[in-house]
Image: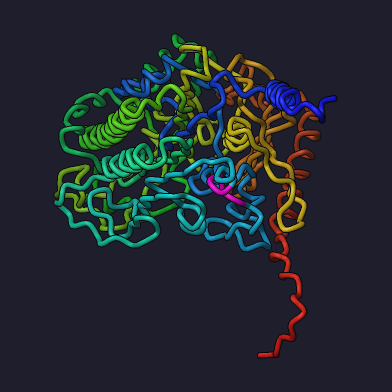
Amino acid sequence: MIARNPALLVCVGVLLVAFLGCSKPRPETGTKPPNILIFLADDMGYSDIGCYGSEIETPNLDRLAANGLRFTQFYNTTRCWPTRASLLTGYYPQQVRRDTVPGVKSGSGGVRPEWARLLPQLLKPMGYRSYHSGKWHVDGMPVASGFDRSYYLEDCGRNFSPRTHFLDDQKLPPVERGSGYYSTVAIADHAIKFLQQHQQQHAGAPFFGYFCFAVPHFPLQALPDDIAKYRSRYLAGWDAVRQERSERLKRLGLTHHELPPLEREVGPPYPFPNALAALGAGETNRPVPWSELNATQREFQATKMAIHAAMVDRMDREIGRVVEQLRAMNALDNTLILFLSDNGASAEMMVRDDGHDPSAPPGSAATHLCLGPGWSSAANTPFRRHKTWVQEGGISTPLIAHWPKGIKARGELRSTPGHVIDFLPTFLELAGGKHPTQRNGYPLEPLPGRSLVPLFAKDTDLHRDQLWWAHEGNRAIRVGDWKLVADKNAAWELYNLKTDRGEMHNLVAQHPDKVRDLSGLWEKQWESCRQLASKDAPAEPPARNSGKKVEPK
C-alpha cells in the first residue's frame, strides 16, 4: 500500500527522520552546536584573578564567572607544554610523548605519535573552523596541525619586541623595540581579526578559538600605566597578601581549609646562581617572612608583584575585547568560553633572552625579572608549592565556564575534580561527535578523561577511577579524596583533600594500606603510559595495485 502511494511514503519518511532526530537530542542550544573558545593564561596562580580571591582587578573574568560557573578543583599537568598537549589531544602528555618517558624520545622536544591528532583535526569533520592566537608549545605548526588561521608567538621572552612569530605558519619580520607592540594586545588583536573574518566568510559554521596569552610568565614585562596602577599595592608583603587571599577564598566558598605556612626552604626548582647575582641586591630566592627582608628587598619585591598584577590586569582587559567581539557578532550566547592557566605560578628565577639591565625601569623591555618563590607562594594561595611540582599549588588552576544557552547556572561553583584531559571529550560531545577508535587500522587507546557536560547542569560524580601526574620525577595520583604525592627521589606522602587540600597533614603512617594501593595504581598508569608512548600507528595503507607494471627506480 505504501509503495503505491508516494505521498504516504513521504509522510512516513518525514516521521521516521523526526523520530530518529528526537531519539538523541542535542543539548538545549538547539540544532547548532556551540562555538568553543579557550583563554589560556601562562604561569598564573590559582588565586590571581578577582573571582578566585585576588586583589588584582579582573572585571571581565569576574563577569564571566558571575554569569557561569567556577570550578574549585580543576587541574593541569604542572608545566606548560604537557598541559597544552593534554588539552589538545585528550591524553596524558606522557602517552603522546610530550612529557618525559625514559627510553623514549619525549619531553618538550618529543614528537607526538601520528595517531595523536589535535582537537582542530577532530572537530573539522563536524563543520568547525579553528583559530589560534598566541603561545603554541606543541610539536608541529598550528595551521599544519588543523587550525584554519593562526598567529603563533614563539618568542615569548620578549613581550615588546618578539623576534620569532608566525602568521598562518609563515614567519613574520622581527618586531622593533619601541614600535608599540605588546604581546597580550597583539594576541587579542589577531583573535578578534580571525573572529571578524569568520563572521564575514563562515557565519554558518561553528568555530573553535584557542587563544593563549604569554603572561604572566616571566620575564615580568608590562605596560607602564598598568604597572603604575599597582605601584604601592604590594608593599605590605607576601605574608599579608596570602592571608588576605585565603580569607577571600573562604568567603567566596572556594576553599575551607587552613592556609599552609610559607615553605621557606623551598626555592626555585632550577639553580641559576649567576642570575641571582645579576638581578641585584633586592632579589631573594627564598620565601622568607616579609619582616626579614631589608628595605631594598621589600621595595624590589613589591615592584615585581606590581608588574605581575599589571600583566594579569591587562590580560583581563584584552579578554574583555574578545568577548565584546563575540557579542558584536551575536555569538556570545552560544559560545562556551573557558578560562584557565597551564600550571601554577612559577618560583623559577633566571635571566635569558635580552638579559637584564638593572638601570632600566622595572617591567620594561630591557629588564628580565621573575616572580620568585615568595610571590609565587602568594599567587598559588591557598596551596603549597609551585609550577613543576605536583602538590596542589603546581597543578591547580581556576576554571571559568560561561555559556548562556547551555549553562543555566549563574555564579555557581562546581567542586567535582576535573582535568585538562577532560576538555577533548567534552568538546566532542557538544559537537555531536566521538573520538575515533582506530587510526589507519591501528586501535587507539581510550581517552583517559571524562566529559564535563554533566557538570554544566549540576555538581555530580563523573565516575572516574583516578587522576594522575608525573613530571621530572615528581609524581602524584588522586582517587576520590585521597591523594598520594612525592617529590623526586622522596618518599610518598598521603593526604585527604576533603579536609586537608593544603597538604599539611601527612597520613602515611595511619594508612599504609592506602599508600600501597595508590602507589600500585600510580605504577600501573606509568607503565601504561610508557608502553603507549613507544607505539606508532602504521603508515597509511598503500593504494590498491592498478594492475600496471611499475618499473623499479
Which image quarter: residue 546?
bottom right
Which colour assignment does the render follow? Answer: rainbow
Front position in the image: 294 or 184: 184
Q: Residue at left 40%, top 20%? A: 64
Towards the viewer: 307 or 550: 550
Establish if 20 lies above or below 186. Answer: above
Q: Position of residue 139 (x, y in %)?
A: 51, 57
Residue stretch rendered in magenta on the structure: 117-121
Q: Main secondary structure of the magenta part?
A: helix
Residue 233 picture location, percent across and down: 23, 24
The quadrant of the picture occupied by the C terminus is bottom right
Task: Please tell me which residue is depicted at 66% across the width and 59% down the height of the picture.
Answer: 102
Taking the image as shown, residue 82 lies to the left or right of residue 115, namely left
Above or below, 409 against 46 in this view is above
Judging depth in this view, the residue of 356 and 545 nearest the camera is 545
Q: Residue at x 48, y 35 (%)?
A: 206
